[in-house]
Amino acid sequence: MTRVFSGIKPTGHLTLGNYLGAMRQWAVVDQHRAEALFCVVDLHALTVDHDPARVRRLTRQAATLLLASGLDPQLCTLYVQSHVDEHARLSYLLECVASDGEMRRMIQYKEKAARERERDGSVRLSLLTYPVLMAADILAYGTDEVPVGDDQTQHVELARDLAVRFNQRYGHTFVVPKATRPAVAARVMNLQEPASKMGKSDDSGLGIVYLLDEPDVVRKKVMRAVTDSGREVVYDPEERPGLANLLEILAACTGGNPDELSAVYQSYGALKKDTADAVVEVLRPVQARHRELCADPAYVEGVLRDGADRARKMARPVVDTAYRAIGL
Ligand code: ADP
Protein backbone atom coordinates (compact mmCIF):
# COMPACT_ATOMS: atom_id res chain seq x y z
CA MET A 1 0.00 0.00 0.00
CA THR A 2 1.20 3.52 -0.77
CA ARG A 3 2.62 5.27 2.28
CA VAL A 4 1.88 8.95 2.72
CA PHE A 5 3.45 11.39 5.20
CA SER A 6 2.78 15.06 5.80
CA GLY A 7 3.15 17.55 8.62
CA ILE A 8 2.09 20.89 9.95
CA LYS A 9 4.13 23.36 12.04
CA PRO A 10 2.73 24.68 15.34
CA THR A 11 4.17 28.15 14.77
CA GLY A 12 0.84 29.98 14.82
CA HIS A 13 -2.89 29.47 14.53
CA LEU A 14 -3.84 27.31 11.56
CA THR A 15 -5.20 29.12 8.53
CA LEU A 16 -7.59 28.63 5.66
CA GLY A 17 -4.45 28.10 3.53
CA ASN A 18 -3.39 25.16 5.70
CA TYR A 19 -6.89 23.74 5.46
CA LEU A 20 -7.56 24.12 1.73
CA GLY A 21 -3.97 23.46 0.71
CA ALA A 22 -3.32 20.48 2.94
CA MET A 23 -5.57 19.33 5.81
CA ARG A 24 -8.77 18.83 3.84
CA GLN A 25 -7.01 16.75 1.22
CA TRP A 26 -5.45 14.62 3.97
CA ALA A 27 -8.86 13.95 5.53
CA VAL A 28 -10.97 13.55 2.41
CA VAL A 29 -8.54 11.76 0.13
CA ASP A 30 -5.22 10.62 1.55
CA GLN A 31 -6.21 8.77 4.71
CA HIS A 32 -8.65 6.67 2.65
CA ARG A 33 -6.36 5.73 -0.19
CA ALA A 34 -3.06 5.15 1.58
CA GLU A 35 -1.31 4.19 4.78
CA ALA A 36 -1.07 7.74 6.02
CA LEU A 37 0.92 9.46 8.77
CA PHE A 38 0.21 13.04 9.80
CA CYS A 39 2.47 14.82 12.21
CA VAL A 40 2.46 18.06 14.17
CA VAL A 41 6.10 18.95 13.58
CA ASP A 42 6.89 20.75 16.81
CA LEU A 43 10.70 20.48 16.46
CA HIS A 44 10.39 22.68 13.38
CA ALA A 45 8.71 25.36 15.49
CA LEU A 46 11.99 25.86 17.39
CA THR A 47 13.87 27.16 14.36
CA VAL A 48 12.72 30.72 15.06
CA ASP A 49 12.20 32.72 18.24
CA HIS A 50 9.40 31.05 20.22
CA ASP A 51 7.65 30.98 23.55
CA PRO A 52 7.80 27.43 25.05
CA ALA A 53 4.31 27.49 26.57
CA ARG A 54 2.85 28.78 23.31
CA VAL A 55 4.50 26.06 21.22
CA ARG A 56 3.06 23.44 23.58
CA ARG A 57 -0.40 25.01 23.38
CA LEU A 58 -0.31 25.38 19.59
CA THR A 59 0.86 21.78 19.20
CA ARG A 60 -2.23 20.49 21.04
CA GLN A 61 -4.41 22.93 19.14
CA ALA A 62 -3.06 21.82 15.76
CA ALA A 63 -3.62 18.15 16.65
CA THR A 64 -7.16 18.94 17.79
CA LEU A 65 -7.88 20.85 14.59
CA LEU A 66 -6.54 18.01 12.48
CA LEU A 67 -8.99 15.67 14.19
CA ALA A 68 -11.74 18.28 13.79
CA SER A 69 -10.94 18.46 10.06
CA GLY A 70 -11.77 14.80 9.73
CA LEU A 71 -8.57 12.87 10.34
CA ASP A 72 -9.69 9.54 11.76
CA PRO A 73 -7.25 7.73 14.08
CA GLN A 74 -8.73 4.43 12.87
CA LEU A 75 -7.63 5.28 9.33
CA CYS A 76 -4.39 7.20 9.81
CA THR A 77 -1.59 7.76 12.32
CA LEU A 78 -1.67 11.19 13.95
CA TYR A 79 1.16 12.12 16.31
CA VAL A 80 3.60 14.78 17.49
CA GLN A 81 7.11 14.78 15.99
CA SER A 82 9.04 15.21 19.25
CA HIS A 83 7.31 12.14 20.73
CA VAL A 84 9.19 9.95 18.26
CA ASP A 85 12.98 10.13 18.70
CA GLU A 86 13.66 8.60 15.29
CA HIS A 87 13.18 11.95 13.53
CA ALA A 88 16.12 13.58 15.32
CA ARG A 89 18.22 10.39 15.14
CA LEU A 90 17.86 10.18 11.39
CA SER A 91 18.27 13.90 10.85
CA TYR A 92 21.86 13.75 12.06
CA LEU A 93 22.75 10.98 9.61
CA LEU A 94 21.23 12.98 6.77
CA GLU A 95 23.26 16.03 7.80
CA CYS A 96 26.26 13.86 7.03
CA VAL A 97 24.96 13.37 3.49
CA ALA A 98 23.67 16.89 2.73
CA SER A 99 25.92 19.83 1.85
CA ASP A 100 25.83 23.32 3.31
CA GLY A 101 25.50 24.88 -0.17
CA GLU A 102 22.41 22.82 -0.80
CA MET A 103 20.85 24.20 2.38
CA ARG A 104 21.71 27.81 1.60
CA ARG A 105 20.00 27.53 -1.77
CA MET A 106 16.59 26.77 -0.23
CA ILE A 107 14.20 29.60 -1.06
CA GLN A 108 12.42 29.47 2.29
CA TYR A 109 15.73 29.67 4.12
CA LYS A 110 16.75 32.79 2.23
CA GLU A 111 13.42 34.47 2.98
CA LYS A 112 13.18 33.45 6.62
CA ALA A 113 16.86 34.03 7.41
CA ALA A 114 16.64 37.59 6.10
CA ARG A 115 13.63 38.22 8.36
CA GLU A 116 15.27 36.67 11.41
CA ARG A 117 18.53 38.56 10.89
CA GLU A 118 16.63 41.81 10.72
CA ARG A 119 14.57 41.02 13.82
CA ASP A 120 17.06 39.19 16.00
CA GLY A 121 20.49 40.00 14.58
CA SER A 122 21.22 36.30 14.16
CA VAL A 123 19.81 33.18 12.53
CA ARG A 124 19.49 29.84 14.33
CA LEU A 125 21.54 27.07 12.77
CA SER A 126 18.42 24.89 12.91
CA LEU A 127 16.74 27.21 10.41
CA LEU A 128 19.46 26.31 7.93
CA THR A 129 19.26 22.57 8.63
CA TYR A 130 15.46 22.50 8.87
CA PRO A 131 15.01 20.87 5.44
CA VAL A 132 17.25 18.01 6.56
CA LEU A 133 15.01 17.33 9.55
CA MET A 134 12.06 17.50 7.19
CA ALA A 135 13.78 14.95 4.94
CA ALA A 136 14.22 12.73 8.01
CA ASP A 137 10.51 13.12 8.84
CA ILE A 138 9.69 11.80 5.38
CA LEU A 139 12.38 9.16 4.88
CA ALA A 140 12.01 7.53 8.33
CA TYR A 141 8.70 6.04 7.26
CA GLY A 142 9.53 4.68 3.84
CA THR A 143 7.20 7.36 2.51
CA ASP A 144 6.10 7.14 -1.14
CA GLU A 145 4.14 10.38 -1.35
CA VAL A 146 4.16 13.72 0.46
CA PRO A 147 1.01 15.78 -0.12
CA VAL A 148 2.06 19.43 0.29
CA GLY A 149 1.31 22.91 -0.96
CA ASP A 150 3.53 24.48 -3.63
CA ASP A 151 5.66 26.22 -1.01
CA GLN A 152 7.04 22.89 0.21
CA THR A 153 7.90 21.15 -3.05
CA GLN A 154 11.55 22.27 -2.97
CA HIS A 155 11.96 20.62 0.43
CA VAL A 156 10.49 17.35 -0.83
CA GLU A 157 12.92 17.52 -3.76
CA LEU A 158 15.74 17.71 -1.24
CA ALA A 159 14.40 14.65 0.58
CA ARG A 160 14.48 12.82 -2.75
CA ASP A 161 18.05 13.92 -3.46
CA LEU A 162 19.23 12.85 -0.01
CA ALA A 163 17.50 9.47 -0.30
CA VAL A 164 19.10 8.79 -3.68
CA ARG A 165 22.54 9.94 -2.49
CA PHE A 166 22.39 7.88 0.71
CA ASN A 167 21.25 4.79 -1.21
CA GLN A 168 24.06 5.20 -3.74
CA ARG A 169 26.73 5.63 -1.10
CA TYR A 170 25.63 3.17 1.54
CA GLY A 171 23.31 0.70 -0.16
CA HIS A 172 19.57 0.74 -0.64
CA THR A 173 17.99 2.07 2.56
CA PHE A 174 15.32 4.65 1.74
CA VAL A 175 12.26 4.77 -0.45
CA VAL A 176 12.56 7.81 -2.77
CA PRO A 177 9.46 9.94 -2.09
CA LYS A 178 7.60 12.34 -4.34
CA ALA A 179 5.46 15.43 -3.67
CA THR A 180 1.79 15.42 -4.62
CA ARG A 181 -0.43 18.50 -4.76
CA PRO A 182 -4.17 19.06 -4.43
CA ALA A 183 -6.13 19.80 -7.62
CA VAL A 184 -7.27 23.27 -6.54
CA ALA A 185 -6.06 25.87 -4.05
CA ALA A 186 -2.52 24.54 -3.83
CA ARG A 187 -1.62 28.07 -2.79
CA VAL A 188 -3.98 30.41 -0.94
CA MET A 189 -2.71 33.98 -0.88
CA ASN A 190 -2.90 36.64 1.83
CA LEU A 191 -6.11 38.65 1.38
CA GLN A 192 -4.30 41.95 1.97
CA GLU A 193 -1.09 41.12 0.09
CA PRO A 194 -2.03 38.77 -2.73
CA ALA A 195 1.63 38.48 -3.75
CA SER A 196 2.46 36.53 -0.59
CA LYS A 197 0.92 33.32 0.67
CA MET A 198 -1.56 33.13 3.52
CA GLY A 199 0.87 31.83 6.13
CA LYS A 200 0.28 31.56 9.83
CA SER A 201 2.05 34.29 11.74
CA ASP A 202 1.46 36.48 14.72
CA ASP A 203 -0.13 39.04 12.48
CA SER A 204 -3.73 39.42 13.53
CA GLY A 205 -4.45 41.64 10.55
CA LEU A 206 -7.14 41.21 7.95
CA GLY A 207 -5.10 39.21 5.43
CA ILE A 208 -5.28 35.84 7.12
CA VAL A 209 -8.39 33.76 7.76
CA TYR A 210 -7.81 31.49 10.74
CA LEU A 211 -9.68 28.21 11.07
CA LEU A 212 -11.15 29.32 14.38
CA ASP A 213 -12.28 32.77 13.19
CA GLU A 214 -15.93 33.51 13.99
CA PRO A 215 -18.25 33.87 10.94
CA ASP A 216 -18.48 37.66 11.26
CA VAL A 217 -14.68 37.93 11.37
CA VAL A 218 -14.38 35.73 8.26
CA ARG A 219 -16.93 37.90 6.46
CA LYS A 220 -15.13 41.11 7.41
CA LYS A 221 -11.77 39.77 6.19
CA VAL A 222 -13.09 38.49 2.87
CA MET A 223 -15.19 41.61 2.17
CA ARG A 224 -12.11 43.79 2.76
CA ALA A 225 -9.80 41.67 0.58
CA VAL A 226 -7.54 43.74 -1.66
CA THR A 227 -8.44 43.47 -5.35
CA ASP A 228 -7.80 46.07 -8.08
CA SER A 229 -9.44 49.01 -9.77
CA GLY A 230 -11.05 46.89 -12.53
CA ARG A 231 -14.75 46.14 -12.69
CA GLU A 232 -15.12 42.97 -14.70
CA VAL A 233 -14.63 39.66 -12.89
CA VAL A 234 -11.96 37.72 -14.79
CA TYR A 235 -9.61 34.96 -13.69
CA ASP A 236 -6.08 36.24 -14.31
CA PRO A 237 -3.59 35.22 -11.59
CA GLU A 238 -0.75 37.25 -13.14
CA GLU A 239 -2.49 40.58 -13.68
CA ARG A 240 -5.30 40.36 -11.11
CA PRO A 241 -3.87 38.30 -8.24
CA GLY A 242 -6.30 39.47 -5.53
CA LEU A 243 -9.33 38.61 -7.62
CA ALA A 244 -7.82 35.30 -8.73
CA ASN A 245 -7.19 34.38 -5.10
CA LEU A 246 -10.86 34.98 -4.22
CA LEU A 247 -11.97 32.89 -7.21
CA GLU A 248 -9.61 30.10 -6.20
CA ILE A 249 -10.81 30.14 -2.60
CA LEU A 250 -14.44 30.07 -3.77
CA ALA A 251 -13.65 27.24 -6.20
CA ALA A 252 -11.88 25.25 -3.51
CA CYS A 253 -14.77 25.72 -1.08
CA THR A 254 -17.55 24.88 -3.55
CA GLY A 255 -15.82 22.33 -5.76
CA GLY A 256 -16.01 24.67 -8.78
CA ASN A 257 -13.46 25.94 -11.26
CA PRO A 258 -12.06 29.49 -10.87
CA ASP A 259 -12.24 30.30 -14.57
CA GLU A 260 -15.83 29.14 -14.92
CA LEU A 261 -16.85 30.88 -11.71
CA SER A 262 -15.51 34.21 -12.99
CA ALA A 263 -18.21 34.20 -15.68
CA VAL A 264 -20.95 33.93 -13.03
CA TYR A 265 -20.17 37.25 -11.33
CA GLN A 266 -20.95 40.78 -12.50
CA SER A 267 -19.33 42.58 -9.56
CA TYR A 268 -16.47 42.20 -7.10
CA GLY A 269 -18.92 42.73 -4.23
CA ALA A 270 -21.09 39.75 -5.19
CA LEU A 271 -18.03 37.54 -5.60
CA LYS A 272 -16.74 38.56 -2.18
CA LYS A 273 -20.07 37.93 -0.52
CA ASP A 274 -20.39 34.41 -1.96
CA THR A 275 -16.74 33.66 -1.15
CA ALA A 276 -17.25 34.76 2.45
CA ASP A 277 -20.39 32.59 2.75
CA ALA A 278 -18.58 29.61 1.22
CA VAL A 279 -15.65 29.94 3.64
CA VAL A 280 -18.00 30.24 6.63
CA GLU A 281 -19.81 27.05 5.53
CA VAL A 282 -16.56 25.13 5.05
CA LEU A 283 -15.32 26.15 8.51
CA ARG A 284 -18.62 25.56 10.36
CA PRO A 285 -18.35 21.76 10.84
CA VAL A 286 -14.63 21.97 11.64
CA GLN A 287 -15.28 24.55 14.36
CA ALA A 288 -18.20 22.55 15.80
CA ARG A 289 -16.10 19.40 16.04
CA HIS A 290 -13.21 21.40 17.50
CA ARG A 291 -15.47 22.61 20.32
CA GLU A 292 -16.48 19.01 21.10
CA LEU A 293 -12.89 17.80 21.12
CA CYS A 294 -11.77 20.64 23.40
CA ALA A 295 -14.23 19.32 25.96
CA ASP A 296 -12.40 15.96 25.93
CA PRO A 297 -8.64 16.65 26.10
CA ALA A 298 -7.95 13.13 27.40
CA TYR A 299 -9.25 11.71 24.13
CA VAL A 300 -6.87 13.89 22.10
CA GLU A 301 -3.95 12.92 24.38
CA GLY A 302 -4.81 9.24 23.91
CA VAL A 303 -4.89 9.59 20.13
CA LEU A 304 -1.47 11.24 20.14
CA ARG A 305 0.01 8.60 22.46
CA ASP A 306 -1.25 5.73 20.30
CA GLY A 307 -0.13 7.57 17.18
CA ALA A 308 3.40 8.01 18.51
CA ASP A 309 3.57 4.30 19.46
CA ARG A 310 2.55 3.28 15.95
CA ALA A 311 4.88 5.79 14.29
CA ARG A 312 7.84 4.64 16.39
CA LYS A 313 7.28 1.04 15.36
CA MET A 314 7.31 2.03 11.70
CA ALA A 315 10.32 4.35 11.87
CA ARG A 316 12.66 2.34 14.08
CA PRO A 317 13.56 -0.44 11.61
CA VAL A 318 14.22 2.08 8.83
CA VAL A 319 16.42 4.29 11.02
CA ASP A 320 18.26 1.28 12.50
CA THR A 321 19.02 0.08 8.97
CA ALA A 322 20.39 3.52 8.09
CA TYR A 323 22.64 3.52 11.19
CA ARG A 324 24.09 0.15 10.23
CA ALA A 325 24.49 1.11 6.57
CA ILE A 326 26.44 4.29 7.35
CA GLY A 327 28.90 2.44 9.58
CA LEU A 328 27.58 2.75 13.15
P1 ADP B 1 2.75 27.50 7.27
O1 ADP B 1 3.36 28.01 6.04
O2 ADP B 1 1.35 27.95 7.50
O3 ADP B 1 3.63 27.57 8.49
P2 ADP B 1 3.24 24.65 7.32
O4 ADP B 1 4.67 24.74 6.94
O5 ADP B 1 2.89 24.23 8.69
O6 ADP B 1 2.50 25.98 6.96
O7 ADP B 1 2.54 23.73 6.28
C1 ADP B 1 1.48 22.86 6.51
C2 ADP B 1 0.86 22.52 5.18
O8 ADP B 1 0.00 23.59 4.79
C3 ADP B 1 1.86 22.34 4.06
O9 ADP B 1 1.46 21.25 3.24
C4 ADP B 1 1.78 23.64 3.31
O10 ADP B 1 2.13 23.48 1.95
C5 ADP B 1 0.32 24.00 3.47
N1 ADP B 1 0.09 25.43 3.38
C6 ADP B 1 0.52 26.38 4.23
N2 ADP B 1 0.10 27.61 3.84
C7 ADP B 1 -0.60 27.42 2.69
C8 ADP B 1 -1.29 28.30 1.79
N3 ADP B 1 -1.37 29.61 2.00
N4 ADP B 1 -1.90 27.76 0.72
C9 ADP B 1 -1.87 26.43 0.52
N5 ADP B 1 -1.25 25.55 1.32
C10 ADP B 1 -0.60 26.03 2.39
Image (spheres, grey):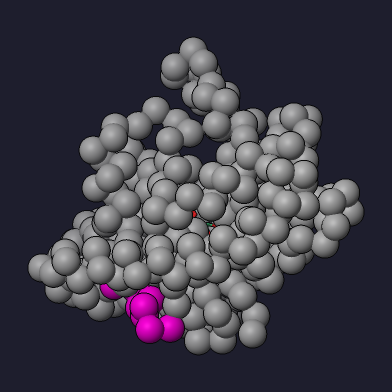
Please report the residue visible at 37 percent of the width from the left and 48 percent of the height from the top.
10
Q: Which residues are magenta?
A: 68-75
Residue 8 percent across, percent down from the top left: 45, 56
Q: Is residue 141 left or right of residue 286?
A: right
Q: Is residue 46 left or right of residue 283?
A: right
Please report the residue visible at 28 percent of the width from the left and 35 percent of the height from the top.
52
Work out whether 241 lies above or below 123: below
Tell which of 229 and 178 is nearer to you.
178
Please report the residue visible at 49 percent of the width from the left and 59 percent of the height from the top.
7
Residue 142 percent across, percent down from the top left: 66, 67
Tell which of 174 and 177 is nearer to you.
174
Q: Quadrant of the N terminus?
A: bottom right
Q: Is residue 266 magenta?
A: no
Tell which of 110 and 164 is nearer to you.
164
One can see residue 149 in this view: no
Q: Residue furthest left?
A: 295
Q: Is residue 73 magenta?
A: yes
Residue 118 percent across, percent down from the top left: 50, 17
Q: Quadrant of residue 139?
A: bottom right
Work out whether 216 lies above or below 35: above
Q: Quadrant of residue 163?
A: bottom right
